[in-house]
Amino acid sequence: MISPAGLFAHIPLDPTAVASPWEWGWTAIGSLATGLAAIVTAITAVFIYFQTKETAKAASAGQHSAEAANEALTLTRAQQRQTLFIAAEALKTRIDATMPSVRVIADESIIWEPQFPGEFLDSPNWNVPAGSEFNLPADGKQQILIQVSVSIWNEGPGMAHLRFNHPITNGNETLTTADLPEGQGLEEYTYSVQCSVDEWAKIYQERRQGAENSGFSFEVTSVHPMDTGAVDLTRVGFGGTLIEPVPEKTGAWRLLLTPGTSDDFPGVGTEPTERTYFVSRAGGRRLPDYTLEETDPGQDSEIL
């Protein structure tokens, strides 16, 4: 009987010729795992690609939606402002139809009669003698005035309720307010422009530096009788001075010698009337100034 050892004694033993079953099983499993990992990686890459593409589409769609929403909001606000503009214009038209038209006429030809004011409230003024001289600073506080003629007419419709920032007089009465019926006027009234010698000299010097007027103005305010109404403001500007330096005499000033030809001779001019509209005068609520050209949609609109 041949033993198992003798049976295989003639076969050479090469340990590398045949791998053990265990080694063959792990190698196959490793290869299979590697292949599956590669497949999973590929599938994942494809999934990420399509997911990224869909995300980009969603982001683009969201951006377009936001732009469309902004455009719609801009259009809505523009339409709202146009509506407010139309409403405001309609209210202005209604106010204009009932607001009296007040015409202020100032006499540009000033009568050359500078005066010293009276010492007391009821005492009369007296004329400044031609060629009068004043020494600064000694005479700096001396007051000199000149009167300007003005006429005011109410061209209607209705009663005009007037206020003046400086009193006007016709010699018989002095007014700071007036209720002027339609078609009537205040004729041959005057108001006074009064300054000290120091102030008249300062105006002369400022004019040499390019200033055009002294900053004095006579103002007529016309008030609409209704709470929802308007206020008109008409200004009569005054420019020029009454005195000039005396040549070669330091600190000496004199009344203008040739007022009709001097560039510093006083002059007046009436400015265009400014009309301010109110939703409520009592409440101080002005009518907003809407324009069709306004393009700022982010500005809050006030409701009338």
Image (spheres, helix red, strand yellow):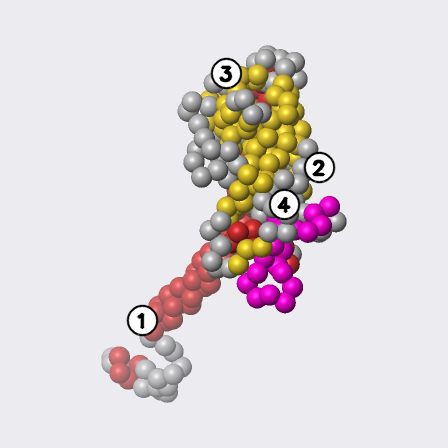
Amino acid at circle 3? Met
Q: Which residue is mark 2?
A: 109
Q: Give the CA distance from mark 4 to mark 3.
A: 36 Å
Check if mark 2's residue and mark 4's residue have beta carbons within 8 Å. Answer: no
Q: Which residue is mark 3?
A: 226
Badge nearest the viewer, 1 or 2:
2
Left or right, 24 with respect to 212, comes to: left
Q: Which residue is mark 4?
A: 239
In the picture as drawn, the residue positioned furthest to the right comes out as: 261
Mark 2 Cα within 10 Å, few/some/many (few <14, many 20+)?
Answer: few
Residue at position x 35%, y 84% from top?
A: 15
Q: Earlier in the sequence, mark 3 or mark 2?
A: 2
In the picture as drawn, the residue positioned furthest to the front comes out as: 129
**Start and end of the magenta stretch?**
238-260
What mark, if any, has residue 22 been given in the picture? Answer: 1
* Callout 4 secondary element: strand
Image spot of residue 297 (x, y percent): 55, 37
Image spot of residue 44 (x, y percent): 46, 56
Image spot of residue 85 (x, y percent): 60, 26
Q: Give the CA distance from mark 4 to mark 1.
A: 119 Å
Amino acid at circle 2? Ser
Amino acid at circle 1? Trp
Q: Is residue 57 visible?
A: no
Q: Earlier in the sequence, mark 2 or mark 4?
A: 2
Residue at position x 40%, y 64% from top?
A: 33
Badge nearest the viewer, 4 or 1:
4
Q: Earlier in the sequence, mark 4 or mark 3?
A: 3
Image spot of residue 176 (x, y percent): 49, 26
Q: Is residue 4 visible?
A: yes
Name which quarter of the figure residue 147 lies in: top right
